[in-house]
Amino acid sequence: MTRPPVQDTWVYPDYRGAGIVNLMASVISACGGRADAYAPLPTLELQPLAGARKLVLLVLDGLGYAYLTQQGAGSALHRQLRTRLTSVAPPTTATAITTFLTGQAPQQHGLTGWFTWFRELGSVLAVLPFAPRCGGRPLGGTGVSAAALFGHVPLFDRLPVKSASVCPEWIAHSEFNRAHLGSAELLPYRDLDQCFSSIARAVRSTDAPGYVYAYWPGFDRLAHELGVASDGVSEHFAALDAGFARLLDRLAGTGTTVLVTADHGFVDVAADRRIELSAHPVLKDCLALPLCGEQRLSYAYVRAGCDQRFEDYLDEHLGQSIEWHHSAALLQQNLFGLGGPHLELASRIGDYTLIMKPGYVIQDPIAGEKPFAMVGFHGGLSAAEMYVPLIVAEC
């Protein structure tokens, strides 16, 4: 049966004009490229680059709209806030960063969470490390190409201007990053100060029009480890904000537009609301694979003949914490994007999608996997996770 989502609880991605995929359409258009699949943001008027005009997109991993407008109220970032956007589904780094790097929604790029089932390989991969979930080295070392497997056209290759990618040293040469680098100049950095310095140096390195993409993961790391409401995250935000203010000063007079956004927001989850699938052996027995996707939005691959038992168990024992849907129905409802889907999208979202209700996560670790020791989570459809800021500063 088709189960309509609880509309007053969930926030669905807006792919028709108010989401990060529309932001990327605006970026492509502003740089003189052609954005075909998704409309540009109607709230963001960016003319094609001309003369010495530059465009910077800074993605602050995990900085949700709720955090910026509440804990970050009055900050330099907040003062430049233009509007809020929705992320994609699920709102998580592996999926949303791929949107920033391709200009496509998950409907087209086909990466649907941290753990994704690749039918082509007969394996579940941790997408960003590009390694099997069961462990081992990244697949690039075994002859499997991330670029060939994903089949993505890097956004940088769709722009008729010089581009640069500013990213941490520890991911700069990863399989995932190389698959999406295209023609961009790679500018690795070691710390926050060097990140902002690299952006400024990329802008000032030439008078020609250009596009700079920069990614900072520090907020996300601390929000996972300490919780988004922690003092440690607050201190880090203050450092981010001060760095942003200095960056605007360094870019003054360059004719640069700086856009700042995020891939997702965060929620903190109490320890007693973390559902361990091992405590539900009947449910676990229904599965053909360990749960994939995210701990706040998971994909269940159910063994033949177990559908009714699976549904009944969820309704009877976990109805207060989980809302389940047939994944095919969510695909039809455009949860993952608009238009023709990736050829493997249906296989990557399983038979059922488990959307966790506010305050809950579900955990299904495999043998040998380190325990999940996080406080902050994302990937669900709550407003705190789905809404991200759009900050616009003219320099």
Image (spheres, rainbow, N blue to C red):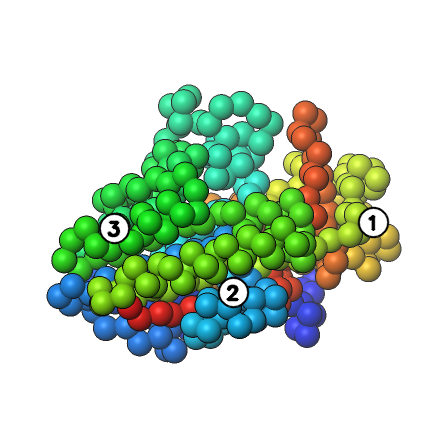
Question: Percent x, y for residue 207?
Answer: 14, 58
- Looking at the picture, which amino acid does disc 1 mark? Asp
Describe residue 230's horizontal placement relative to residue 62 as left or right.
right
Real-space CA distance between mark 3 and mark 2, rounded to the nearest whole angstrom: 26 Å
- Above or below, 170 against 305 in this view is above
Residue located farthest toward the right when viewing the structure as drawn: 316
Describe residue 213's horizontal placement relative to residue 17 as left or right.
left
Labels 3 and 2 touching (C-beta < 8 A): no
Q: Which quarter of the rendering shows the C terminus? A: bottom left
* Mark 3 crowdedness (10 Å alpha carbons): few <14, some 14-19, many ≥20: many
Describe residue 177's horizontal placement relative to residue 75 as left or right.
left
Residue denoted by label 1: 272
Q: Quadrant of residue 246?
A: bottom left
> In the image shown, does 50 or 2 lie closer to the viewer?
50
Question: Percent x, y for residue 235?
Answer: 58, 54
Real-space CA distance between mark 1 and mark 3, rounded to the nearest whole angstrom: 47 Å
What residue do we see at 42% from left, 56% from top? 243
Q: Which quarter of the rendering shows the N terminus? A: bottom right
- Looking at the picture, which amino acid does disc 2 mark? Val
What residue do we see at 35% from left, 59% from top? 247
Residue denoted by label 2: 388
Residue denoted by label 3: 202
Of marks 1 and 3, which one's residue comes earlier in the chain? 3
Question: Percent x, y for residue 329?
Answer: 60, 61
- Looking at the picture, which amino acid does disc 3 mark? Ala
* Mark 1 crowdedness (10 Å alpha carbons): few <14, some 14-19, many ≥20: few
